[in-house]
Image (cartoon, rainbow, N blue to C red):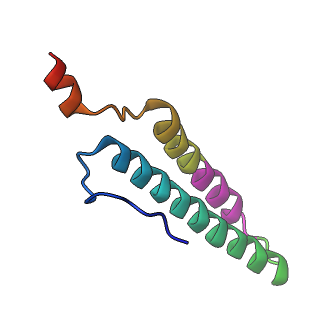
Amino acid sequence: MPPRWSRKPDRKDADFRKLDDRMTFAVHVAAFGCFNSGAWFARIIQEADWTWTIWFTGISLAILVSHAVYIFAIADYSDPAASSRQG
């Protein structure tokens, strides 16, 4: 069941931005899994000596981990409108 959003979606809304970024990350994890497992499956089935699959996996995983670090540790999801109203 898809997530429900009770109000109009707006990237200025901090809660929506956080949910949107996490859903985008989930899509990237799924894409990594599909492409990576497909490459390794083809390598094993064809008994090929592809050295690029190791590089592909490593670079893709590094990009995915950096995306996760940004989403879960660095990104600031505080509401800028709320902080400007207080000050």
Q: Residue visible at 50% across and 31% down?
A: 73
Residue 60 magenta: yes
Q: Residue visible at 75% across and 71% down?
A: 40
Q: Residue visible at 55% across and 58% down?
A: 26
Q: Residue visible at 14% across and 15% down?
A: 87
Q: Quadrant of the N terminus?
A: bottom right
Please state the horizontal and vertical placement of residue 37, each as a whole percent of the image: 72, 70
Residue 56 magenta: yes
Magenta segment's dominant SS is helix
Please state the horizontal and vertical placement of residue 52, each as a whole percent of the image: 66, 64
When the figure is inspected, residue 74 is found, relative to residue 46, above or below; the finding is: above
When the figure is inspected, residue 37 is found, relative to residue 12, above or below; the finding is: below
When the figure is inspected, residue 44 is found, relative to residue 24, above or below; the finding is: below
Q: In this rendering, would 21 be left or right of 31?
A: left
The span shown in magenta is 50-61
Please state the horizontal and vertical placement of residue 58, each as a whole percent of the image: 65, 51
Q: In this rendering, would 28 be left or right of 78?
A: right
Report which quarter residue 8 is drawn in.
bottom left
When the figure is inspected, residue 23 is found, relative to residue 45, above or below; the finding is: above
Q: How many marks?
A: 0
Q: In this rendering, would 68 be left or right of 35?
A: left
